[in-house]
Amino acid sequence: MDELLGEFIAETRETLEPLASEIVAWELAPDDRARLDSIFRFVHTVKGSCGFLDLPRLERLSHAAEGALAEVREGSRRPDKALVSGVLCIIDRIGELVEALAAGEPYPEGGDDALILALEPGNDPDEAAPASAHAQPQPQAGPRAPARSIRLPVELLDRMMAGVSDMVLARNELSRRLRDRGNDGSIDAAFERLSTCVAEMRESITRTRMQRIDGLFSALPRMVRDLSADLAKQVLLAVDGGDVELDREMIEMIRDPLTHIVRNAIDHGIELPAERQAAGKPASGTLRVLARQSGNQILIEVADDGGGIDDERLVQKAIGAGLIARERAATMTRTERLELIFSAGLSTATAVTAISGRGVGMDVVRANVERIGGTVDIDTQPGRGCRLTLRVPMTLTIIPALTFSVGAELFAIPRGAIDEIVRASGGSVVVERVGNSPVARIRGERVPVVALDALLGIDSYIDPARAILVVVRASSGERYALLVDSVQDHEELVVKPAAPAIMATGIYAGTTLPDNGRPMLLINPAGVAHIAGVQAPDASMSAKSDVPEAVIETIPTLLFRAVDGAVRAIRLGLVERIEDVPSTAVANVGGRLRLSHDGRIVPLFGCEAVVPDKYDCVRVLLLGDGSSEIAYAIREVVDIHALSPDCLPASTPGPIAGVLLVGEMQVELIDCFWLFAQAGAGLGAAERPLCLFDRDDPWMRDVLRPIVEQAGYRVAYSGDPDDQAAAVMILSAERESGPPVSHAPVIRLRATADEDHAASGSVYRYDRSGLIAALVAAQGGR
Amino acid sequence: MDSLKLIARIADQEVAIATSLIESVVEVEAITRVPLAAPHIAGLAALRSRVLTIIDTYAALEIGHSPREGILQAVVVTIDHHLYGLLVDEVVDVAAIASEPDLLHAGLSRGWAHAALGLVEHNGKALLELDPARIVAGPAVLAA
């Protein structure tokens, strides 16, 4: 309230100053309509503010003056000398009262009645006015409290902001030049100081543009009161988070969408008291409006406990309006159905009311919010209520971002949207292909992968296995991993909106000029999710959700009865064929069962020994990963199910990846990854190639050995009797010269993940797939 | 001063653009591609601390693609508070052309017809006067 009061005082003072000359002019020419209007406007404004701020004395005075002036404006009263002096006295009194307010001093009571009475027609103001002059000592005599605030045009702030943005760019340019020229301590220190100053300046200018969202919320109680009275509904309004700060411009941009949502909630959401009681709810509906800051975003939630949205009716309406085809409607998920509320030309209101349903719909709300880089989400339960969430950026001007490259192109993405950054082939990350789309498993959790090179039609420079996954959580809730070539830098970027033709693609949030002076595009994570077809997990619905078909990503999975009689599962994507092969085609060669098939020999898994059926055949699944092939013996195929990608992982690596739930049944999922890894590793101990370790490196003995052995190698140490037979040798990259060994190829392992620092050609020692690839390469070279 | 026109060459045609709409003419070196944008969006370039959206004028006129070799000349215009650079093959002249553009008679291909305001006379030659806003809006099919 103090803030509002301060604003009122500043505003009143400001208008009083020019008004002084107006008043004098009006006194000379009481018929001057323009003067009359500006004085009327002043008292009218004061009256309005006073009612709001609870200043009854000022309100009474301004109300009296307004009334008299209104009569003059209507022409029902002539502005005689008595009236003019009466109004002037009141305006003087208003000025005195405001100054007293500003100084925090009490203003002597009394004297107002005489002033108001003087405005009555026929009264002589000269009797009242001198009385007041005698009664009140002139407060102006004392020192006027210095103004604590000034009012500025927003354009000036915009210009300052643009200036600071350019300054940041100039600083970045300078920083790049300085880096190119090498170090100079004294210049660096001065530059650091400059950088700090620029950063502080930017910070404070950004703050000048921030405003409490209170200003937006303060209009709500009145609106809710009027609306509910018009509609004979009872609505309790609960507002929270008014102290959240938001860019002034943003506040203006969300004013209309918010108003519309609140109107909708009262008009369509909250039911009539009788209906509510019949439904067992309190007669008064509750409307909650809440704002909070979440990272670089502001969330504004409008939740009602009304009837909710009937998605079935929505779909029927959409079909009726020709927005969707009936066939399409049958396959829509609940989220998709609710999304219909944002389509143009759809209103669930059965009758057009004065309040809403006038053709300006949720589509306009969404468009307006998206224009400023925000999103609107809806969450509803029929009979329980509806919640709309607006997410808008705090400011569009400067954001911390991560820059990355795909092929020759550089892009930026808001840092706030990033969950984590992992290598596509790190220790705990596996990228699999499901159908034709890649899915990453990161520490057991599956995340859809969006390959930016494919999405944007750019040629990637690197092998997908060496790419980087940037795990992103879009503001609309989708979580996915962007596959990019490499991550460049964290930067503070000045972001400006791009041209409409560029924004129309939906995947960019704006443009920016980074240090190197080449314009760069800022990726809009929600837009990419939309274009790439990534869907948000339906987390907003509770477990009790009445919609079982909520969005769940599924993988076609083959269930089969294994040779031992148990039912197991295998991901269908890897199964190339199911065939019956004669049992004679299977032989135990080289330490494991192998199947000769179509002129090739493929390792056979799934059984210890062949169990032929009555036709002397064995049924096998032929699995391929694109390059190699393996066979898996089964008894019979059970079924194909679409199953969740999640499985409870097995504790140790082996033929079983984990356990899946199929209906009520627990089914073991075959780990094809492991099988393929084993395919080449089944040789008898003596036939296995020998891998030589550095004897002096305990890490190799303790950590590396099991991995290398699992890959199908025998392990020996330098200095062992048979070290001359080694097929390959592993040394640490940091070791300058290894112990004298055979001429076996050497794989060097480095301790850091960072390639730049390491000797060329070395492998990061926790890069399992890199190591295996190096082993294979070394084998091939012999 | 409204009669001043910039005369530029696009695909062996000399065209006129009212200078009142033009901010400057710049040379563009590096263009950042904008994947997935409409074909007439050539990309982005920097103009001091501002970002220019470069328009492939050929594509906007539906006559192929502007040459992208070497240093390119672009006519800078501001439309709806956004800066655009229209790629031209060469800026020929700035001349005062007093006459109002004459109405076109048929015969132009769709792209030219969409972007043209009319015919103006200069040194005894008839030039098409183009509307930068229509070029920026892109081919008629997309704008529709």
Image: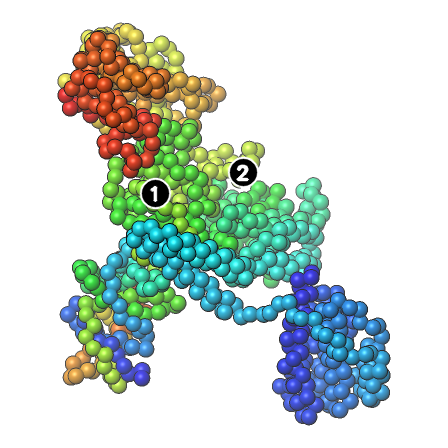
* Residue at left offset 37%, top offset 49%: A412
Question: Residue B96 location, x and y as percent?
Answer: 25, 83
The correct choice, above or below, for A498 with respect to A746 in the image is below
Can you tell which quarter of the image residue A776 is in?
top left
- Residue at 19 percent of width and 17 percent of height: A741
- Where is mark 2, residue-wise? A541
Q: Secondary structure at mark 1?
A: strand
Q: Is residue A94 left or right of residue A336?
A: right
Distance from disc 1 to disc 2, alpha carbons, whole Å, reads: 35 Å
Percent position (x, y) of residue A738? 23, 21
Residue toward you, A356 or A601: A601
Inspect the image, locate mark 1, and give the three-letter code of the amino acid beneath it: Val
- Residue A71 visible (yes or no): no
- The spot of residue A343 in percent (x, y) is 46, 53
Count the marks.
Answer: 2
Look at label 2 and name its amino acid: Met
Rendered position, A71 above or below A692: below
Task: Say which residue label 1 marks.
Answer: A487
Closer to the camera, B27 or A457? B27
Q: Are marks 1 and 2 in contact (CB under 8 Å)?
A: no
Circle 2 chain:
A
Q: Residues within 10 Å of mark 2 (few under 14, many from 20)?
A: some
Quarter that holds the N terminus of chain A: bottom right
The x, y position of residue A202, in whole percent, is 48, 58
Residue A217 vs residue B90: left or right?
A: right
Few, some or many C-alpha atoms within 10 Å of disc 1 (few <14, some 14-19, many ≥20)? some
Chain under label 1? A
Which mark is first along the chain, 2 or 1?
1
Residue drawn at x 29%, y 16% as measured from the top left:
A695
Q: Nearer the viewer, residue B95 or A434?
A: B95
